[in-house]
Image (tube, grey):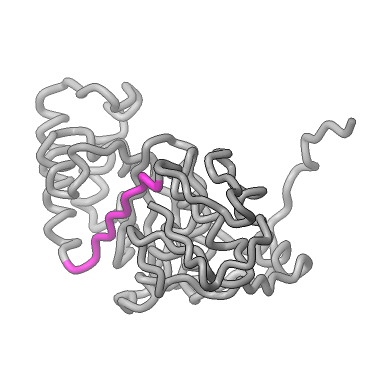
Amino acid sequence: MIQIDQSLCIGCGLCVQDCISGYMRMEDGKPVAPSACLQCGHCVAVCPQGAVRIPEYDMDDVTPCAIHLDADALLSSIKSRRSIRKYQPKKIEREKLDNIVQAGRYTATAKNTQGCRFVLVQEELDTFKEFIYQQIERTVQSGTLPDGVPAAMQQQYPRFLALRKQGVDFLFRNAPAVLFVAGNTPVDAALAAQNMELMAVAQGLGALYNGYLNYTIHLAPELKQWLGLEDKASYVCMLLGYPAVDYVRTAPRKPADVVWK
């Protein structure tokens, strides 16, 4: 529940004006906190005096706003990113993984549900790989696919197994880490994943969106349970690691399909 320090509040009313739920109101020249709200934090962010708190959140995490993005540099970075399919045999530092999580955590979510869950597999990646390939083999032998896995995967799984026997790790590409992004909606997960990829690239890492692997975790309930996703839908899977290939120029793209009105 929102708390307002009346000794700091100057009665400017900015929090009331910016309340997206419309529940905050002014009484006797001072804002009154609602009994229920979305806890979106707009009132905290807009208050010039720092008089508003939401005790359910870590208020020490609140910092002054500082947007340092240069439009040209940002566009150049977006154009320069590549899907990485070759990785160095090097683990990702925990600090960098934490930064990636924070980029996802601060991404906007519908109705401020903040319902995304991020699963990062690095320390137990070998165990996860074995689990994945065992389930693929069982699926191939059974000839059936569970709900949520496209029929086209039935043709791909034998190929994945054959490549692995040849020493080709097609599903994991020798990446040291795998990230799953689950959420209440596909949009929430996709938005978070985009920010997380940008943070990864900003730290010298590369990423590859992996739909094959995301579908594969639906092969057995034990897979999702192992990942801690038994109660969440995973919408995005991403390989992460240090690139083993350098790209020196951007790739061409078709003209934008845009309608100007």
| Rendering coords of residue 241 (x, y %) | 38, 68
Q: Is residue 30 left or right of residue 211?
A: right
- Above-or-below relation of 140 to 205: above
| Rendering coords of residue 238 (x, y %) | 39, 53
Whether residue 69 is visible to the viewer of this picture, yes or no, is yes
Image point (77%, 35%), residue name: 257
The residue closer to the viewer here, 244 or 97, is 97
- Is residue 122 on the magenta stretch? yes
Image point (73%, 53%), residue name: 252
The residue closer to the viewer here, 110 or 125, is 110
Which region of the structure is painted magenta? 114-123
Tell me the quadrant of the picture where the C terminus can be found: top right
| Rendering coords of residue 120 (x, y %) | 28, 60
- Above-or-below relation of 150 to 69: above
Please identify the quarter of the rendering in which residue 86 is found. bottom left
Q: Is residue 152 left or right of residue 221?
A: right
Image point (56%, 60%), residue name: 82
- Is residue 241 on the magenta stretch? no
